[in-house]
């Protein structure tokens, strides 16, 4: 039987970054990926670095917004992790942090912006509320419809097609073993650690396990006899043809589903949480098949984009695509050790691109025996009651 100090399940950003950090610290690491590196949500997303509280936390009342404000502390850490990652990896990842704007079109939305900014400033995030005229001095591409905006000077975007492959290469160079096309079928206790196995007959003994497999995280946790309240969601992304520099910022909307940025190549990427339709089979959702586009999501997303940045109406749409991720029962990420099963760690549930580098760094510390209080707010411990009858 093979053996490693740590087994990581999932070849996305968090999995590869954690493998890199642990290998640098001297641990023997085996990363197991059912397909190829970066083929899941880490490579399908639009690359936003959104450190402000997201709209999805604001649209469901103050209680959820107050809870979400707690992860602003992680956002502050993520700003520094993203600022330093190109230097650490010695790679060009097209990280651009020229600021972000969350805009409002109605008086009610302006009031929501102001409450959001108050929460963020209490947590130490630098956010400024400006009226529409001042917003247009920073961003002349904005529509006259925009009445106000929250300005966060550290926000931006990076290239999701570049970051995870670079992390995978760094993990290999540091000594981690990455095994592609190696689905994990069993996760079982083995002495004080775990034994993982696959249908092809392989097995691996390990002291610690990290499950960081996006929408597949909950089914994998079930193989360890654990409930993990993570639910798959399918989202839509769009890209225009290339154009001259137009939008240097990350643009979001406080009242409509919109995220917008311009890549280093000149394409405008348009998203913001518009749904696609998950594939289904006789047992329910089928994560092995691509989600399908919902036409109303496409038209709604593009309408929000052109209402906010009118110049987009003059650009051709190059392509649209769908991607599958997972959200948790309370919409906060689930990251850390499972109290009922010491040695088993989870990382999934949203914000995995923006906060992924920070999650990986903190997880590597926790899995090396360090105290990591920063992860307390996203700990799986908050759902421990769900496993009270699991044995």
Image (cartoon, helix red, strand yellow):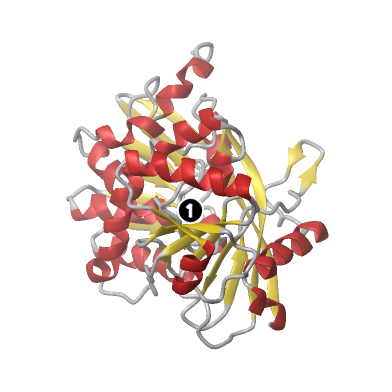
* Vertical placement of residue 117 versus 297, above or below: above
* Vertical placement of residue 296 versus 286, above or below: below
Q: Say which residue label 1 marks.
A: 33
Q: Position of residue 259 (x, y in %)?
A: 57, 61
Q: Residues within 10 Å of mark 1 (few under 14, many from 20)?
A: many
Quadrant of the rendered image containing residue 236 = bottom right
Q: Residue at x 50, y 12 (%)?
A: 388
Q: Position of residue 253 (x, y in %)?
A: 58, 56
Q: Nearer the viewer, residue 109 or 275?
A: 109
Q: Position of residue 355 (x, y in %)?
A: 39, 50
Q: Nearer the viewer, residue 316 or 345?
A: 316
Q: Position of residue 349 (x, y in %)?
A: 51, 41
Q: Is residue 2 visible?
A: no
Q: Which quadrant would the N terminus be assigned to in this image?
A: top left
Left/right placement of residue 177 relative to residue 310 reads: left
Q: Is residue 77 visible?
A: yes
Left/right placement of residue 151 relative to residue 147 reads: left
Q: Residue at x 39, y 52 (%)?
A: 356
Q: Residue at x 82, y 38 (%)?
A: 282
Outermost residue to the bottom: 244
Left/right placement of residue 344 relative to residue 12 reads: left
* Vertical placement of residue 366 versus 35, above or below: above
Helix, strand or loop under label 1? loop
């Amino acid at each position: 039987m093979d053996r490693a100090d740590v087994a990581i399940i999932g070849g996305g950003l968090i999995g590869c970054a954690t493998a890199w950090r642990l290998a640098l610290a001297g641990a023997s690491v085996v990363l197991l990926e059912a397909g190829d590196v970066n083929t899941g949500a880490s490579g399908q997303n639009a690359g936003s670095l959104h450190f402000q509280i997201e709209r999805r936390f604001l649209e469901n009342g103050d209680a959820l917004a107050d809870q979400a404000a707690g992860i602003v502390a992680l956002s502050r850490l993520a700003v520094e992790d993203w600022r330093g990652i190109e230097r650490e990896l010695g790679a060009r990842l097209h990280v651009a942090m020229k600021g972000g704007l969350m805009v409002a079109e109605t008086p009610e939305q302006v009031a929501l912006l102001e409450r959001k900014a108050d929460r963020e400033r209490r947590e130490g995030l630098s956010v400024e509320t400006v009226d529409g005229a001042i917003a247009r001095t920073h961003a002349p591409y904005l529509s006259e419809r925009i009445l106000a905006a929250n300005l966060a000077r550290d926000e931006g975007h990076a290239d999701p097609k570049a970051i995870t492959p670079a992390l995978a290469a760094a993990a290999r160079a540091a000594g981690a073993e990455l095994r592609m096309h190696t689905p994990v079928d069993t996760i079982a206790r083995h002495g004080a650690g775990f034994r993982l196995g696959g249908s092809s007959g392989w097995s691996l003994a390990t002291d610690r396990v990290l499950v960081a497999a996006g929408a597949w995280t909950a089914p994998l946790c079930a193989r360890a006899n654990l409930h993990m309240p993570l639910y798959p969601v399918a989202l839509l992304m769009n890209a225009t043809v290339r154009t001259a520099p137009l939008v240097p910022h990350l643009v979001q909307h406080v009242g409509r589903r919109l995220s917008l940025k311009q890549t280093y190549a000149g394409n405008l990427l348009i998203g913001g949480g518009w749904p696609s339709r998950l594939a289904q089979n006789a047992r329910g959702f089928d994560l092995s098949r691509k989600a399908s586009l919902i036409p109303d999501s496409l038209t709604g997303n593009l309408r929000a984009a052109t209402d906010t940045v009118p110049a987009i109406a003059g650009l051709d749409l190059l392509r649209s695509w769908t991607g599958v991720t997972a959200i948790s029962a309370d919409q906060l990420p689930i990251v850390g050790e499972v109290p009922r099963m010491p040695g088993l760690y989870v990382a999934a549930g949203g914000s995995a691109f923006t906060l992924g580098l920070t999650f990986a760094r903190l997880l590597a510390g926790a899995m090396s025996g360090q105290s990591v209080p920063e992860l307390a707010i996203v700990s799986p411990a908050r759902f421990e009651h769900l496993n009270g009858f699991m044995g």
